[in-house]
Image (cartoon, rainbow, N blue to C red):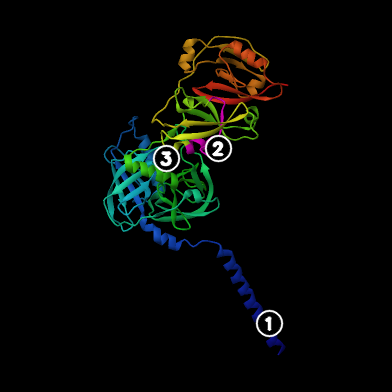
Amino acid sequence: MTRMLRCVAISIAYLLFHSALFINTATATEGLPDFTRMVEANSPAVVNISTERTPQLSQSGDGSREREMEEFFRRFFPPDQFPRPDRGDREAQSLGSGFIISKDGYILTNFHVVDQADVVKVRLSDRRELDAKVVGSDQRSDLALLKVEATNLPAVRLGKSESLKVGEWVLAIGSPFGFDYSVTAGIVSAKGRSLPTARNENYVPFIQTDVAINPGNSGGPLFNLAGEVVGINSQIYSNSGGFMGVSFAIPIDVAMEVVQQLRSSGRVSRGWLGVVIQEVNRDLAESFGLDRPHGALVSKVLENGPAAKGGLMEGDVITSFNGHSIERSAELPHFVGRVGAGSEAKLDVVRNGERKVLTLKVGELADESGEPGVGRTDAADQNAIGLTVESLDNATREQLGIEHGVRVVRASGASEQAGIQAGDVVRRLNNAVIASVTDFDRAVAALPAGKSVPVLVQRNGGSVFLALRVPG
């Protein structure tokens, strides 16, 4: 009897243990999303994009660049799929992803997927392959709108990227390395990331995720848990060329504004203020009378530009644009670029420690822009802040594209610590315009001891404010 009771007790304990194990396992997985239905519903609207373009021989003529590219593709593509670089007798190919946004055949992808393509082909989930026409493209946002001749196509549902929250689950479908309809998932790591282009432009507030994105995912959709597209996968941050846990997507709200313009006119018009801006650090915030570092500091106002006509000045700190608070300078182009040319904009600025409201008419961003180079000048003496400067002649000012300033011959002490360098042109010191060495000496004599003051310098064709702490 005792043995029987012992066996029953052991059996009950065994059942209780496994029941608890089952409950714990169910609890652990209860919060994880099930992506299966969403993938089944949305995969048919995702497409594979391949392009062809007329090959161009390398200038060196030795084929070394082509061999390097072939080795790259050999590493990341299956042997029967990798696109072989041009040898002069075949056409180059590019692989990417895209997704159908309307049943009548409009498809959204990245600009860099179809850039310079002579032929664009779209492969659907049912294995149909259709020729696509590039309706329009926009390099600044890395977006391209395609059109195929077909009807009743499966299309995605569009969400609102503005509603995304950091930590939210998202999912990508695309063709990494040519593997069609690969699914990867992760969370939103951050919003409003700024990734300047080669021309130092920044008009897209990227969504950062930890979703695994690799070559071939470009142009594919990023979904939220409701099965709505909230972004277009565009870039990865990598030291190796492969996924490193950081990827970036273009917000769908921004993308659809671009799509609307591409469909109507084939091009994109963006707002433009005509200023050069920089970040506000702690020392600059103190020197400009701000309670904390925030806003976009205007280091240059372009002559006859919208900002100049609207009364914006060098040294102004823009803290708000059309009601949108500007915490970091990189946020300003995001808002300005989305405003139509000719529209009125309201700016909150801090000028000489006082808050002002300006209203100006936004211009249109040009396709190209340039800055002049740096010239030479003549001599003068060092002063209390460790700066030796010299005057500028009329020819140098004209060459630099500025109306006033003095050239730095040598920087030491407080000036060197502030980042001022030989060859810089000092244009403003503590908000005083510097038109001559006399102006400069007068401004230095009036500097408040032990305080940080702003210095506007011209360097390598650009303008930048530096915070100089005056010796006590």
Q: Which residue is mark 3?
A: 141
Q: Residue at x 62, y 78 (%)?
A: 15
Any magenta on residue 322?
yes
Q: Which residues are magenta?
A: 313-335
State left or right for residue 80 relative to residue 239. left
Residue at image position (54%, 61%) is 32
Q: Position of residue 218 (x, y in %)?
A: 41, 46
How packed mark 2 is, by other alpha carbons closer than 10 Å (few <14, some 14-19, many 20 or more), is some
Q: Report how far apart the C-alphas of labels 3 and 2 lie in the structure.
A: 21 Å
Q: Secondary structure at mark 3?
A: loop
Mark 3 packing: few (<14 Cα in 10 Å), some, or many (20+)?
many
Residue 84 visible somewhere in the drawing: no
Of residue 451 and residue 118, the one placed in the foreground of this image is: 451
Q: Name the amino acid type tagged 3.
A: Ser
Classify mark 1: residues with Cα within 10 Å, few (<14), some (14-19) or many (20+). Answer: few
Left or right for 340, reference 106: right
Q: Is residue 339 magenta?
A: no
User: Which residue carries the number 2 mark?
Assistant: 326
Q: In this rendering, is residue 80 above or below 28?
A: above
- Residue type at mark 1 is Ala
Quarter of the image where one finds residue 430: top right
Secondary structure under the numbered disc 2 in the rendered image: loop
Q: CA distance from mark 1 to mark 2?
A: 68 Å
| Residue where numbered disc 1 is placed | 9
Query: What amino acid is at disc 2?
Result: Ile
* Rendered position, 63 above or below 146: above
Q: Quick check: can you spot residue 331?
A: yes
Q: Are marks 3 and 2 in contact (CB under 8 Å)?
A: no
CA gap between label 3 and label 1 equals: 69 Å
